[in-house]
Image (cartoon, helix red, strand yellow):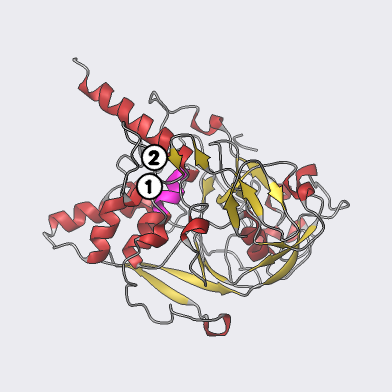
Amino acid sequence: MKSSTHAMAATGVLISCCAYVVLALFAASGRAGEPAGPNGETKEDPRFTPTVTWLPEPFPVEDSAATCEAEMKAYTEQISGTGVTFDMVPIPGGEFLMGSPADEPKRKADEGPQHRVRIEPFWMGKYEVTWNEYALLADRLDFDRRRQQRRRPTQWDEAADAVTCDSMIIWDFMEEEKRDGRPATNMSQLGAKMYCKWLSAKTGRYYRLPTEAEWEYACRAGTATAYSFGDDPTELDDYGWYYDNCPDLPERVGLKRPNPWGLYDMHGNVAEWTIDQYLPDFYGRSTGEVLVAPLAAVQTTYPVVVRGGSWDDDPDKLRSAARRASDPDWSMQDPQIPRHRLAHTDALFVGFRVVRPLVLPEEEEAVLYDATGADWERFLEYERECQEDVSKPR
């Protein structure tokens, strides 16, 4: 390397005969998503509440509505008021064998045992989220352009402004002229989650990160081989960017061949955030039943799961079943004290793509996909310390 289902709140971890993953999501100070104030009260703030509870009406986009799987179509989403678009691909529901077989070359122990998983239908980003999209929030381009043009905010603007977090990026990780069409990188999992929250506000459609199971299901696209194109890593040059065929930056999205379901760069380019906590023995907790939309809900900042491998990895890291755990060292060069909560200075190899479930989750389920109470507790602590630093006499 060049550098280095639905789930319900409870204590502990349990995979029941109904195949639901259950994890503790209640902090001592209050329910996840509602951090307690100085007197113990909870805050009614869109940033701290499940996205589904405050979504504005959908921004009109052709082919974006569906009431059942048969009605799902590919569509081009428009980020309202920006002129920026991205493509979404329908992913059919179904079952698959998650993980890798014991005889797969370069297989790691955390990829097994294989187990059957059922996934509900959803849409997934055809490409990884690019800087063209992410900079609207991370660099405040959306807000600044609107202010310069003296445009009155729409209902989607107002909803997005309510969930915007300042200081998404510490510095430019890539020269601006090199960003165009390339995947956004260097965000933390919380940074990616906040983008999804902001994007949901700007479109009126519910977007989030994929679960680890959804990601592998979409990557495999009905295949059972090491890669979505087969078992031979010598064919990887046609499908992905990795150590041997990529320079020192991620490449523009969509330059290689897609997988059977029309998704590009699932193998390589940048590794992609999922929602799940990384648990090396997670697959071994299966009861043998078919797991329905499994999720290891996040309780600690590290480690969480990234998938797909990157331009900085060897071919075996790009296999469909390969897992990787996030690491605090991804912020080693962060000059801020405390380290930034929304960015990773040393993670030019990490990005993400978005998904949109066909069925909008109930609030209790949506809590598991948003930033958790622990996420916000640390973020608010970070904000307070930054404000205290600014107010110190110089």
Q: How crowded is mark 2: few (under 14 residues within 10 Å), some or many (20 or more)?
A: many
Q: Is residue 288 left or right of residue 218?
A: right
Q: Is the magenta stretch mostly helix, strand or loop?
A: helix
Q: How crowded is mark 1: few (under 14 residues within 10 Å), some or many (20 or more)?
A: many
Which percent across, then down, holds residue 62?
39, 81
Q: Which residue is drawn at 15% across and 54% down?
A: 147
Q: In which quarter of the image is residue 231?
A: bottom right
Residue stretch in magenta: 190-195
Please state which amino acid type lies under the numbered disc 1. Answer: Phe
Identity of the residue furthest to the bottom in this view: 70
Q: Is residue 394 magenta?
A: no
Which percent across, then down, holds residue 14?
70, 48
Q: Mark 1 points at which residue?
A: 48
Indicate whether 338 appears above or below 323.
above
Quadrant of the drawing holding the C terminus: top left
Please state which amino acid type lies under the numbered disc 2. Answer: Pro
Q: Name the residue under label 2.
A: 35
Q: Is residue 323 left or right of residue 131?
A: right
